[in-house]
């Protein structure tokens, strides 16, 4: 081990390279989260991976906009 190290070119931050994914905070209903965790337990994948796959499948069907509009209409009716 050296007595002194030159750290003038060192950078702070994560050592692991990014994988193209982003860290976010999202609020999910407990029953939804539990269901994904239960499914993940038997697959060998993590529950976050299963949620990501479910969202990709949903987006591939092209129904996201229609569903969002329907949910917004329902919520506005409840509030008004």
Image (cartoon, helix red, strand yellow):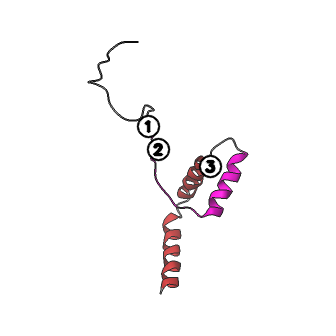
Residue marked by disc 2: 21
How far apart, in angstroms, are the residues tagged by discs 3 and 1?
A: 20 Å
Task: Write the residue at 41% across / 12% down.
Answer: 1
Q: Are marks 1 and 2 in contact (CB under 8 Å)?
A: yes
Q: Secondary structure at mark 3?
A: helix
On whether residue 5 falls in the magenta region, the answer is no
Q: Which residues are magenta?
A: 20-42
Locate residue 52, reporting x and y percent: 56, 50
Task: Write the residue at 62% across / 49% down.
Answer: 47
For marks 3 and 2 on the same chain, the one whose residue lies earlier in the sequence: 2
Q: Are marks 3 and 2 in contact (CB under 8 Å)?
A: no
How far apart, in angstroms, are the residues tagged by discs 3 and 2?
A: 15 Å
Task: Write the residue at 56% across / 61% down.
Answer: 28
User: Is 54 situated above or below 64?
Assistant: above
For marks 3 and 1 on the same chain, the one whose residue lies earlier in the sequence: 1
- Density class for disc 2 (Cα within 10 Å; few <14, some 14-19, many ≥20) is few
Locate residue 11, reporting x and y percent: 32, 30
Locate residue 25, reporting x and y percent: 47, 55
Q: Determine which of the numbered discs, if any, sits on residue 66 in the image.
A: none
Residue sitting nearer the eye, 12 or 35: 12
Q: Secondary structure at mark 1?
A: loop
Residue marked by disc 1: 18
Residue furthest to the right in view is 42
- Density class for disc 1 (Cα within 10 Å; few <14, some 14-19, many ≥20) is few
Residue marked by disc 3: 47
Residue furthest to the front in view is 3
On whether residue 21 falls in the magenta region, the answer is yes
User: Is 1 situated above or below 10?
Assistant: above
């Amino acid at each position: 081990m050296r007595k002194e190290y030159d750290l003038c070119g060192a950078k702070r931050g994560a050592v692991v390279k990014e994988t193209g994914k982003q860290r976010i905070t999202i609020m999910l209903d407990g029953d939804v989260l539990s269901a994904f965790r239960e499914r993940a337990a038997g697959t060998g994948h993590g529950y976050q991976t299963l949620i990501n796959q479910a969202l990709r499948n949903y987006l591939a069907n092209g129904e996201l906009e229609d569903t969002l509009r329907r949910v917004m209409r329902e919520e506005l009716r409840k509030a008004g």
